[in-house]
Image (cartoon, rainbow, N blue to C red):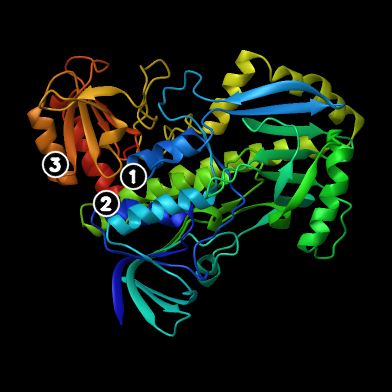
Amino acid sequence: MDTTEVLVVGAGPTGLTLACALLRQEVPVRVVDQAPGPAATSRANILHARGVEVLDRLGALGDLPERAVTALTITAYAGGRPVSSLRFGDVGLGTARPALLVSQADIEAELRRVLAELGGAVEWNTALTGVELDDTGVTAALGTGKSVRASWLVGCDGAHSATRKLAGIGFPGAPIADRWLLADVRLDWPLDRSGSHGWLHRDGVFGALPMRMVGGADDVWRLMAYVPDAGAEKLGEDQVLEWFHRLLPERTGVTDFRIRGAVWTSVFRIHRRLAERYRRGRVLLAGDAAHIHSPLGGQGMLTGIGDAENLAWKLALVTENRATEALLDTYQAERRPLAVNVLRRTSANTRFQVGTGPVTRFLRERVVTPLLDRPVAQRWATAAAAQLWVSYRRGPLAEPTSRFARRPRPGDRVPDLPCRRANGDTTRLHAELGDRWALLSSATVETPLALARERLGERIDNFTLADVRPGEVWLVRPDAHLAWRGAPEAGGLARWLDHALRTGRVR
C-alpha cells in the first residue's frame, strides 16, 4: 500500500495552497482530484488582499498582478443611471498587495506551478471512495482501485465533499436565494473594462464583470443575473444565452450590444452551510468542504485559502512531533468563527440585494448604494472584503490582553512591515514568512531565538524592526498573525511555546 504523511483531496485553490505550504515545510503530501484535469473556467474571479498576501508568502503570485486588474471599481446603477462607484484597492490597510481581479483558473495554475517546483503533482481522475480511521492514521480507498495510507487526510473537495460524507460530518444549512444565471460570454458593448458593473432592478440584480482569460482575450465578460422565475428545469447553454439576450437590455438599458457566444454557462442556487466540525480524528476539512455561502462579495476562495494557510503550519509541527494533536484543535477554534461571520454577512447582503419589498428597494437604491461613493464607505467596504481584519484574539492561542494594550495584540495580523535581517539587509516581513516564523525585536536577541528554535526547529529567524519597543520581542506565526509579545527574560515566551505546542491552549 502506498503511504504518505498527508493526503489532500481536492486540487482547487484550498487544496493546492495547503499542499504547497506543507511541501515548503518538507511534509510529504499527495494530492488527488476526481476531475479529469485542471479547470479552464471558474466561478471565482476576484481575490481580495488577504488571499493575495497568502499567495505572496507561498511564492505563487507569479505574473498575476501584471495580468489582473489590481484596483477593482464596481459601478452601481439604479433607474438606468450610475449612483455610486466603489473602488477596491489599498486604502491604508497596511498591505502592499491589493485585491486582484483574476480568474480562479489562473490562480490554480500558479499554485500548480509552485507545487511542481516543490516536487509535487496532482493525481487527476482519482476520486476518494472510502475512508477507514484509526488512532494512527487513515486508510483511503481511491477510485483507481488502489489505497493510500496517510497519517492525515484533509478534504478540500468542495461543497459536495466526499471526504466530509465519508467521515460522517454533518453539513446543515438552508437556501438563501433562488435561481441565478451565470455566463462567460464574448460580448461587444460600450462599457468600460477597467471595472465591473451592477444594476439594481425591480425584477432582480444584474452584474457584468470583465474577465482576464488565458491567451489574452479581452472581449470576455462574466454576466450574472438573479432570475427567480426561470423555472425548475435544467437550462442548457443556448437557453442561458437566450435569457441574457432578453435580460441585458431590460435590466441595464443598454441596447447597443452583441453576444457572440459563450465560453461557459451555469445555473445555480445560493445556499449557506457550515460543517458541524472541522475535524474527526485524523480527517480534517477546509474550504468549501467546511463552509459554503453566497458568492456575492468574493469571500469563498479567500476564506478557503485562509483555512489552508492556518492549518498548514499546525499540521507541519504535529507531523514533526514538535506539537501534540491538541494544536490541530485550534484550527477549528480559530477558523470556524470566521466562517460563521462570513456566512452571516454574505447571507444578509444577498437577501438585501435580491429583496423586492418597497422598503428594501428604497433603502437599497436611494440610501445604501449612493452612500458607497463616500470615502469612509469605500474604506469600510474594502476592509470588510479584504479580510485583513481577521484576528484570533479570542482563540485558544492568544493570551488575553487589556483592551487598551498596544496593537498588534496576540492573535492580530501583523502588517507587511519593513525590517532587517541579521546581516543588515532590508526585507519585508511577509516575504520571510509562509513556511517560517519570525522573531521581531528592536535589536538582535540571541537567547529568545535559541529558545524558539529549540521548540519550533530551524524555521525561525530574528529580524529587527523599529516598531518593536526596546526590551520587547514579537513572535510572528507563519500566517502573519502575532503569536506572542513581551519581555523574553520574564519566561513568557517559553510558557507560550510549551502550552501552545503541548495543550493547544495558552489561556
Label at residue 58: 1
Q: How far apart are marks 3 and 2 (CA)?
A: 18 Å
Q: Which amino acid does label 3 sit on?
A: Arg
| Residue 231 sits above or below residue 96 on the image | below
Would you say residue 326 is visible in this rendering?
no
Q: In this view, does 207 lie to the left or right of 121?
A: right
SS for dot 2 = helix
Q: In this view, does 28 lie to the left or right of 458?
A: right
> Measuring 90% from the left and 34% from the top, which residue is drawn there?
357
Residue 179 placement (x, y as % from top left): 79, 53
SS for dot 1 = helix
Label 1 neighbourhood size at 10 Å, few (<14), some (14-19), many (20+)? many
Q: Distance between the residues labelled 2 and 1?
A: 8 Å
Q: Find disc 3 in the rendering and name its residue.
A: 453
- Which residue is more in the foreground, 66 or 5? 66
Q: Which amino acid does label 1 sit on?
A: Leu
